[in-house]
Image (cartoon, helix red, strand yellow):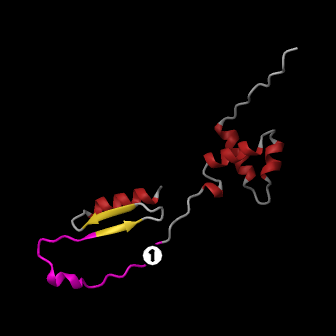
Amino acid sequence: MAPIRRKRRSWNRDDKRRIVDESREEGASIAEVARRHALNANQLFTWRREFNLDPAARKTITPILPVTIAPDTAAEGSTSGSRGQMEIVLSEGDRILVWADVETAALSRVLKALSRR
């Protein structure tokens, strides 16, 4: 006797969103919502991540640290052609070197892109 094969269900985006929204209601249990819709709870967690609603999947935001700008004491002995640089160290250890002649708009675009990662 051949094994019984189950037909794989397919859910449209609206149905997924409705079930995900139900799982986000006050006091809702993921397991109960999944059972009610004959889903595996892991599938519901996957859908929540797809809609960027799973708190565990959210990225932590690195706080902005205070910066103090002090007068450049080394400027007295430097030559007029010297250029300074700034090193930005990200929380993951990545480093960005910014030269004094960087355009503000370009630096803003880089920092904005990094804030989205």
Q: Which residues are magenta?
A: 64-85
Residue 43 location in percent, x, y? 72, 42
- In the displayed structure, does residue 114 sit left or right of residue 8? left
Q: Tell me the kind of residue under disc 1.
A: Leu
Residue visible at 81% across and 49% down in the picture: 31
Q: Please, is residue 42 above or below residue 75 in the view?
A: above
- In the displayed structure, does residue 83 sit left or right of residue 24? left
In the image, farthest residue toward the right: 1
Total tally of numbered discs in the picture: 1
112 vs 13, nearest the viewer: 112
Residue 93 location in percent, x, y? 44, 62
53 vs 81, nearest the viewer: 81
Q: Quadrant of residue 89?
A: bottom left
**Could you say whether the residue bearing mark 1 is in a helix, strand or loop?**
loop
Q: Please, is residue 28 above or below residue 89 in the view?
A: above
Residue visible at 47% across and 65% down in the picture: 91
3 vs 25, nearest the viewer: 3
Residue visible at 69% across and 41% down in the picture: 16
Q: Quadrant of residue 14?
A: top right
Quarter holding the N terminus?
A: top right
Residue visible at 18% across and 81% down in the picture: 75
94 vs 44, nearest the viewer: 94
Q: Decide whether residue 113 is among the magenta residues.
A: no
Quickly name the residue at label 1: 65
Q: Quadrant of residue 68?
A: bottom left
